[in-house]
Amino acid sequence: MNPIVPHLIVAVLLFAIGMTGALARRNAILTLVGIEIMLNAANLSFVVFWRFGPNPDPQTGLMFALFSIAVAAAEAAVGLALIIVLFRHRRTTSLDAADSMKG
Amino acid sequence: MAATLDQLFVQLLHGMTAPLPEAIRPWVALAISLGAILAVFGLCFGITTVCERKAIARMQNRLGPNRVGPYGFLQFAADGIKTLTKEDIVPRTADQVVHFLAPLALLVPVVLTFLVLPFGRNMTAMDLEVGLLFFFAAGASTELAVFMAGWSSRNKYSLLGAMRAIAQMLSYELPFILSTIGVVMITGALSTTKIVEAQAAAPGEWLARWHVFTPWGLAAFLLFLIAAFAESNRSPFDLPEGESEIVAGYFIEYSGFKFALFFMAEYLGMFSSSGMAVTLFLGGWTAPFAFLDWVPSWMWFFGKLGVLIALFIWVRGTTPRLRMDQLMDFAWKFMLPLALIILPTAAIWHYAGRGWLGWLVTAPIVVGAYVLLGRSLVGRRRIRQRSYRYAAT
Amino acid sequence: MSPIFYFLAMLTLGGAVAAMSLRNPVHCALSLVVTFVGLAGVYLGLGAHFLGLSQVLVYVGAVAILLVFVLLLTRGSGKDEFDERPDRWWPALGVGGGLGGVLIAVVLAQPGLALRTAPPELPTVRALGESLMTDFVLPLQVVGVLLTAALIGAAVLALSDRRRTPQDSGPVTSREEGETRR
């Protein structure tokens, strides 16, 4: 079999799992975990297309994944800080508690 | 003769793997190297524990272990048998799976870090192009094992110890990594083998080009060493396991063989950080002077490693424990800015060259940064000699 | 395809499933680490050594630690309430499963995916660094600014803001009530 297919299937499954979890869990931290899994799935497909894809430039896909890791780290830091602020106001990290527009 | 002795272990490994088919040869070689590393550093661990207890006892005016074997030097064997035969107690409320996995998750990455250390000429178990990154990646994953141990025990002291350990290891990881970037910039490679080769004496020079012989390299070496003390949770940075405060930190609830694994991981972490310090700054397996090149390369490595371990023991015997705020201030207000200042200094050194010009430009920057940051860390407090009112002087 | 890849793929997917379905949030975070490590192994197998090790350094060494730290800081809400209303799982499973099915069908239906069988020459770290400093220098600077902004933003958000806390914890009718709440 073409080696690109199983890799892409893994990336797709990872994305689907992350999306299911992010939609279903209501703990804000676990929703963030789901988003991280989705980001990682996207990273995997970047690397797969870098390795097997037709792009003649040898580094673009790799660079994209590298920058994506850096951005994901920033996203996790800010997201978790927001969750701490939410916890301070509501004493819970459940997303259902964060449904009002008033502070 | 000297060349044979130098390449003794390389030839031995080659002879062992030569009859095997080509496909599995590198894997078998890796497995044999890993076994040799475990055996050598396992023995080192035993000997170091005895030497440490003897040396600290000497510093504290007592005898230390002196019953088992000549001068008590077989104490480590007795201790090993004791921990192996002790009952393994797991708290009833503990998270069984995580509690079981934590010592393994701590020991495996620590052992993996040894794979990229060049013990001698051609003696790197896994000569990766990104060896230094491998070392830091494996070292970073030990923090999670510490958390697993502390959290799964369901004990407030172990949880406190784990939080302290993680806060400390995260804070000191920044100067730990940043202090090595200067070496990477000068060498232009992340491969540990290439870093060592770049520090050998050039033809016609009598002194080796160790990075510690440069102003920025000396400062980076000291930063790396202090951060290594903190990473291995040893005195004066042993808050995570401070006996007088939180009993034993994150591994209170471990007994028997699992406790021995934690103990062993701590010492192996100390060995691997010292080995990396030797590799990065003390020239790895190269001789300090060109006329000493005939000594086998691995002897140089292990000799330097021994000196650094003796330094670790000495510091443990003579320094008091820091307070938590002092620990954090030191990492964030002193070591991190100094590491950031060393980076451009290394770049200036690269362009100014190794001669007097480089020294003239870089040495004042490093010394000035050290003095200014140290002043700002101490602040307005006056440090005087302490006077004891009642004790006899 | 080597058996190592299938093993790593099972590890990655299993970790992800566990991270999304276990009840204890700390177990979820630890399973997530398994996913990260498995993905790093896949990257190493694909020849992206630098990327795989960066993945371990950033995700296992920083993001996972951050996650468990926040989990412990927000303790008290430790129990996830997902078993109280299991009705949220069915639409989520439908959306996730539907999306996964469609994407897998797309992947399998592509006849033109046989793009390059010969592996590209793997870039060395030096080549990566040089292209970071030449072709990708603008993204690098932007990422640096972004990380700095995120660092400052996270610190400002997480700093305890005592002055505003009494008003924010609920509707305050008078100043005295705000004082007593404090």
Image: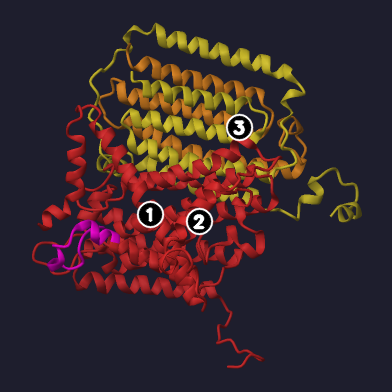
Determine which of the numbered discs, if any, sits on residue B101 in the image. none
Task: Give the quadrant of the C terminus of chain C.
Answer: bottom right
In the rendered image of the structure, the colour used to display chain B is: red
Asked whether C100 or B372 is in front, the reply is C100
> In yellow, which chain?
C
The reply to whether dot 2 and dot 3 touch (C-beta < 8 Å) is: no
Determine the residue positioned at 73% across, 16% down. C87
Position of A83 with respect to C16 (left or right) is: right
| Figure quadrant of residue A30 | top right
| Figure quadrant of residue B115 | top left
Asked whether A103 or B224 is in front, the reply is B224
Assess whether residue B242 is covered by the magenta stretch. no
Check disc 3 and give the amino acid type.
Answer: Cys
A45, above or below B124, in the image: above
Position of B10 with respect to A21 (left or right) is: left
Determine which of the numbered discs, if any, sits on residue B43 in the image. 1
**Disc 3 versus disc 1: distance between alpha carbons?**
38 Å
Q: Which residue is mark 2?
A: B79
Check disc 2 and give the amino acid type.
Answer: Asp
In the rendered image of the structure, the colour used to display chain A is: orange
Q: Chain of mark 2?
A: B
Determine which of the numbered discs, if any, sits on residue C28 in the image. 3
Residue B148 location (% of width, % of height): 58, 43
Q: Which residues are magenta?
A: B284-302
The reply to whether dot 3 and dot 1 touch (C-beta < 8 Å) is: no
